[in-house]
Amino acid sequence: MASSQHHHHYFLQICLLLHIIFVICSSSSCSNAQKVKLTLYYEALCPFCSYFIAHDLPNLFTDGLISVVDLRLVPWGNAAFDSSGSFQCQHGAGECLLNTVEACAVEAYPDPYKHYFLIQCIESLAYQQREAEWQNCFGQVSLDSQRIFDCYNQGVGRQLELQNAYKTNQLNPPHAYVPWVVVNNQPLREDYRNYVAYICNAYKGTPIPAVCSSSQVPINSFAGEMTDAPAQACSAGSPQNSTSFVTTEILEQSKQVFTKMSEHP
């Protein structure tokens, strides 16, 4: 009899636990399970990456899609390491610096409404070839620059970039160029600017975002085949800038890097 009562009590505990889980998952705390994962692998001074971040990705926010999207920005792109472990970036030391700054932005401000709009500002300047003015973006988006400076100066930014290098190098299939956009592990390849259609197609939750029900955008099918790099991308395997880059003190390094870039465009 005691054994039967014990099992009955255990059964009631399980039912209570399942009820609690159901209540919790009925709230917004479980909404991430239904979100579509959108990951952008990029490099800060590739003009096509800059344009995509500054002019195309804002649709996530203006169309309300960000509520159903888990946005992940991975600044590394076609960078590499030299024999000493220093970074070498496709568009020079300024790109290495801004890759690290933007990795720190994601770390310091996890809320996409904060880090995305800071990065968008920087990339908008980069597209205009005004990347040396990147520090002005903190005032424009009302974020404290000290968190980014501390991340960079204390070596956290370098560690974040090592993580981004690993994530990029683990891509399967490997990225052929940047921007390299992935929706729920599906690389969009040259159709990356059509990312909204892929998000709408992948999202299985309710309610459906208005942008998904108002129009149907055709989705290209690549049948798993690797395609040639499109005209609007920076190809992997292109010659790297030979300058080795090691993070030091951010303000002084920024001054040195962008002064040299202006002298040797």
Image (cartoon, rainbow, N blue to C red):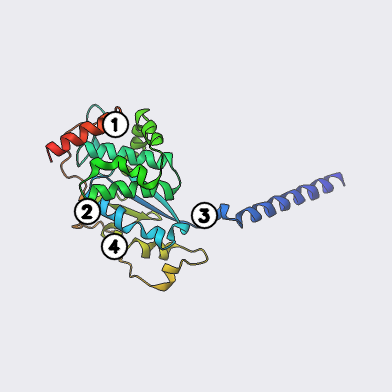
Residue occupying the point 36% across, 42% down:
138
Q: Which residue is mark 4?
A: 222
Say which of 221 and 63 sits in front: 63
Indicate which label's residue lies in the foreground, 3 or 1: 1
Indicate which label's residue lies in the foreground, 3 or 4: 3
Give the mark nearer the N terminus: 1 vs 4.
4
Q: Can residue 167 be seen here?
A: no
Indicate which label's residue lies in the foreground, 3 or 2: 2
Q: Which mark is residue 236?
A: none
Residue occupying the point 60% across, 56% down:
27
Distance from disc 3 to disc 2, alpha carbons, whole Å, reads 32 Å
Amino acid on which the number 1 mark rests in the picture: Leu
Residue at the limit of the structure toward the front, as seen here = 139
Query: Does the CB distance between marks 3 and 2 fall below 8 Å?
Result: no
Distance from disc 2 to disc 4, alpha carbons, whole Å, reads 18 Å
Indicate which label's residue lies in the foreground, 2 or 1: 1
Distance from disc 3 to disc 1, alpha carbons, whole Å, reads 40 Å
Q: Which residue is mark 1?
A: 251
Q: Residues within 10 Å of mark 3 (few under 14, many from 20)?
A: few
Q: Residues within 10 Å of mark 2 (few under 14, many from 20)?
A: some
Distance from disc 1 to disc 4, alpha carbons, whole Å, reads 44 Å
Residue occupying the point 25% across, 34% down:
254
Q: Which residue is mark 3?
A: 33
The image position of residue 146, as x and y in percent, is 39, 34
Query: Does the CB distance between marks 2 and 1 fall below 8 Å?
Result: no
Q: Secondary structure at mark 2?
A: loop
Give the mark nearer the N terminus: 3 vs 4.
3
Amino acid on which the number 4 mark rests in the picture: Phe
Quadrant in which the C terminus appears: top left
Q: Residues within 10 Å of mark 4 (few under 14, many from 20)?
A: few
Instruction: Say left or right for 26 vs 100.
Output: right
